[in-house]
Image (cartoon, rainbow, N blue to C red):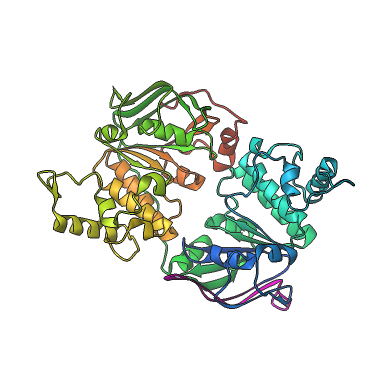
Amino acid sequence: MAEREPIVRFEHISMQFPGVLANDDVSLDIYPGEVFALVGENGAGKSTLMNVLYGLNQPTGGSIYIKGRKVEKQSPSQAISMGVGMVHQHFKLVGSFTVAQNIALCCEPKKKLGLYDFRAANDTVRHLSEEFGLEIDPTAQVNSLSVGLQQRVEILKTLHRGADVLILDEPTAVLTPQETDELFRVIRGIVRDKGMTVIIITHKLYEVMAISDRVGVMRAGKLVGLKNTSEVNERMLASMMVGREMLHAQLDKTGDTGDERIRVENLQVLSDRMLPAVQGVSLSVRAGEILGVAAIEGNGQSELIEAITGMRPVRGGEVFIDGKTISGKTPGEIRKLGLAHIPEDRIRTGVSPAASVEDNLLAGKQRTKEFSAAGVHLKRHAVHDYARKLFSQFDIRGAGVGTAAGSLSGGNMQKVVLAREFSLGADILIISQPTRGVDIGAIEFIHKSIVEKRNAGCAILLVSADLDEVFRLSDRIITLYEGKITGHFRAGEIEKADIGYYMTGARTGSEEASR
């Protein structure tokens, strides 16, 4: 492979943002007809490097060559003209348009009088979908499609523009196992049959092993490793990413379940668009157990959590904490019942970006005797010592506890939320997306902390888009589809390969999630 001419070459690429060197002298060759995986911790520089290739960022140093031609003043339009396409983690589709209208956007077929040719656009999409094995209805409105099919539209849009190099940013983040398998089938097909190059940015190491030919590892802006995938394993890659040995220790679960702490009965909740989001959900969580919720994004799990924590009104049904209804209570009043909440949106509801890290870590304890005199004047020395302790314990990386929380990276903001909520002493935990955007080196610590809380007798309701996380942590798992429970399983009763059917409504289970 080394004897072939690379289709993409990075020569000493650096990308400097204010106060951050995101890419530090990166040199890398990527070859035609290979699947290349780029991995690294949050903030390692992998997405930045691919954004440079696609023209979203202009490098502050170094050169890029595509098909042997040096790129001058790269832009997305120029990248597309040179055969580079990128499918972003958050899709860039017009929801009210049809599949064909999205794919033909900016290169619309026209009739003689300059009118849009719907038939030609639909025929083009049918031909593309047949050619690349990506079956889709060109007349379907994008808003009506599943996440997996929307991703298929993005890929077809890129292929329609003649891409030879396809960049996929976290392509399986919101896919079911079945959709992931289908995506990998498509990737193998376009590489094998069309000779295309596919670059995958991911943090899921088992997927690197399953689909890639070579893998590059980034850490702190540098390319620290470049290997044939057949020569490494997941543990080796994880250790390269964090710069130390990763043990991936087995999580020991101890103790028996206790009393029921959370009970939800026939809960009905509306979405922001005033449409049914949670439809008759009933569940129970006991002390000393973790109930995991597995669902594709947008199937009611967010509204369920917001209703339980008092952040969203309940249309019907009841939520009980320790046998007492929370109807009419504010989020603050519910927290006083012994409930801690790690929300999925750390910026909107997890931290106050303008406040200091210290003040964010203190929130919820500011009127206790330990940190306040008469509930009014803060004991700043005690507050500072407490914040510094949590800052170190949770490996929060930043300029210090006195800096604004909004100045931290997303992963470190998440650590601030985790540190605060885990330290409140609450014995009921509502946890949404605990490791989203968090460095792989901290995931083990977070998982261990969650299980320690469970072993200490806490009742935990866990929502995560990462099925590996749900399976690793949960004692029981429920699946949600369109706001309804479609399955309920004890740990070990179902495999990841099968649970996706329940997450898409292809199979349903009628048992209440309280056994």
The percent position of residue 152, horizontal first and vertical second, equals 69, 47
Quarter location, residue 476:
top left
Give the total of numbered labels: 0
Whether residue 55 sits left or right of residue 376 in the image: it is: right
Query: Up-down: is 438 above or below 469?
Result: below
The percent position of residue 17, horizontal first and vertical second, equals 47, 69
Q: Nearer the viewer, residue 139 or 487?
A: 139
The percent position of residue 314, horizontal first and vertical second, equals 41, 25
Give yes or no for residue 403 being in the magenta stretch.
no
Task: Give the residue displayed 35% in from the left and 63% down from the top.
Answer: 397
Task: Give the residue displayed 70% in from the left and 66% down from the top.
Answer: 78
The percent position of residue 416, horizontal first and vertical second, equals 33, 53
Which residue of the protein is positioned furthest toward the right in this rendering?
A: 112
Query: Up-down: is 112 above or below 404?
Result: above
Quadrant for the C terminus in the image? top left
Which residues are drawn in magenta? 1-29
Q: Nearer the viewer, residue 342 or 444?
A: 342
Quadrant for the N terminus in the image? bottom right
Visible residue check, residue 199: yes
Whether residue 182 sits left or right of residue 361 in the image: it is: right
Quarter location, residue 39:
bottom right
